[in-house]
Image: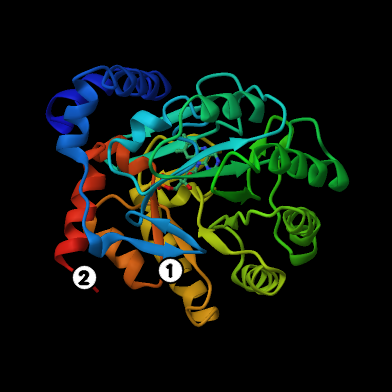
């Protein structure tokens, strides 16, 4: 139904408007009996899909990637589509505005998006209120970033600590986003020391708590492999629990389209081969001993399985949901259950 009716309707609008409309429909579906029907037609549970990664029990390995539900307004309704975990954010300790429109471009034939969205969000306090109102029955991850206006290294590190400490009691795990643009430009951490400046204080802070919340680092697929290896080695030695590989890419040349913006961040189908290569690389580099959450260009059940076979423990979807619809989650889960590795 999504591809035949809903997508043609949603794609009549500009990409940001159609995303808002989609979320409004998701919200509407939560009213009785919609929620029951969404669950009936979308959820797929099987004992073979359950897995334990970084000490958390996931009911299945398919997650929603960051940027889909930035502020956490819709995670309860989105969890009805069968996700095993949902990532909110990127969230900063203070609210952040975004750039002027247009800032999201859709490439229908290529099944791709280019965004210039920056880490626009209402701040962690807003999201905490949403989480306190009601929790989903899937694991909740907060993706954290720094505030617009912070330029010095110590200011940026403080921003991460503040967002982390405010959210600590309210989510199950964290992703630290280190390649996010904000209205002051792009923070792209590409060396071990810069990464340690951000992560070490979070690891120290975690020691003060009785409860243990896994910390993952989300890497850009544009990071040169040598630096990536160094940063992964640091993560493994320091006590980081895993990596998200990866994010959107600045390599717009991967997009085979005549008209494309001069700059932006590409996601969707053209990203898949690059993301898969990085997952394979990290898995080989760490000899399969470090949990990987694969993200980037997964648009089909077969691609989801390729990522898991390449060494990922979990996968995440964003652009795939936009083009294939939320039923993609169930299709992937059924395929994984029918074709165990
Ligand atoms: C519109 C849009 C907004 C995004 N916002 C964020 C964000 O705020 N933080 C983040 O870590 N990733 C963000 N991402 C990246 C996604 O989480 C994901 O890593 C990337 O899109 C690759 O996966 P995909 O090809 O399945 O979309 C965003 C992606 C898109 C398309």
Q: Residue 210: in sight, yes or no?
A: yes
Q: Which mark is residue 340?
A: 2
Residue at image location 20% in from the left, 24% down from the top: 6
In the rendering, at what x and y percent does residue 262 appear? 54, 37
Give the quarter of the image for residue 116.
Answer: top right
Residue at image location 48% in from the left, 80% down from the top: 284
Q: Residues within 10 Å of mark 1 (few under 14, many from 20)?
A: some
* For residue 211, side relative to residue 159 (left or right): left
* For residue 143, side relative to residue 102 (left or right): right
**Front position among marks 2 and 1:** 2
Q: Which residue is mark 1?
A: 277
In primary-sequence order, the first of circles 2 and 1 is: 1
Residue at image location 63% in from the left, 50% down from the top: 176
Q: How is the image coloured?
A: rainbow
In the rendering, at what x and y percent does residue 15 appear? 38, 25
Quarter the C terminus occupies: bottom left
Residue extending farthest front: 210
Q: Residues within 10 Å of mark 2 (few under 14, many from 20)?
A: few
In the rendering, at what x and y percent does residue 161 appear? 76, 44
């Amino acid at each position: 139904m999504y591809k035949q009716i809903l997508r043609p309707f949603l794609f009549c609008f500009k990409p940001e408007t159609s995303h808002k409309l989609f979320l409004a429909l998701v919200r509407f579906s939560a009213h009785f009996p919609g929620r029951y029907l969404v669950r009936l037609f979308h959820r797929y549970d099987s004992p073979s899909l359950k897995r334990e990664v970084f000490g958390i029990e996931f009911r299945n390995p398919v997650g929603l990637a960051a940027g889909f539900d930035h502020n956490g307004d819709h995670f309860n309704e989105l969890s009805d589509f069968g996700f095993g975990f949902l990532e909110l954010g990127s969230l900063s300790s203070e609210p952040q505005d975004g750039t002027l429109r247009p800032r999201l471009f859709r490439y229908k034939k290529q099944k791709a998006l280019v965004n210039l969205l920056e880490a626009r969000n209402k701040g962690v306090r807003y999201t905490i209120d949403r989480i306190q109102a009601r929790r989903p029955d899937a694991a909740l991850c907060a993706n954290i970033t720094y505030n617009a206006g912070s330029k010095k290294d110590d200011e940026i590190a403080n921003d991460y600590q503040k967002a982390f400490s405010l959210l600590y009691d309210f989510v199950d795990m964290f992703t630290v986003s280190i390649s996010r643009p904000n209205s002051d430009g792009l923070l792209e951490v590409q060396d071990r020391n810069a990464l340690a400046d951000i992560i070490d204080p979070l690891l120290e802070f975690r020691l003060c708590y009785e409860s243990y919340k896994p910390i993952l680092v989300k890497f850009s697929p544009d990071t040169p492999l040598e630096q990536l290896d160094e940063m992964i080695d640091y993560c493994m030695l320091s006590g980081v629990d895993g990596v998200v590989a990866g994010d959107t890419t600045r390599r717009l040349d991967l997009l085979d389209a005549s008209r494309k913006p001069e700059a932006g961040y590409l996601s969707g189908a053209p990203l898949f081969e690059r993301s898969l290569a990085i997952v394979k690389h990290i898995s080989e580099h760490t000899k399969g001993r470090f949990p990987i959450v694969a993200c980037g260009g997964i648009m089909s059940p077969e691609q989801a399985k390729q990522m898991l076979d390449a060494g990922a423990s979990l996968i995440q979807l964003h652009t795939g949901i936009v083009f294939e619809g939320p039923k993609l989650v169930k299709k992937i889960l059924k395929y994984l259950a029918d074709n165990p590795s």
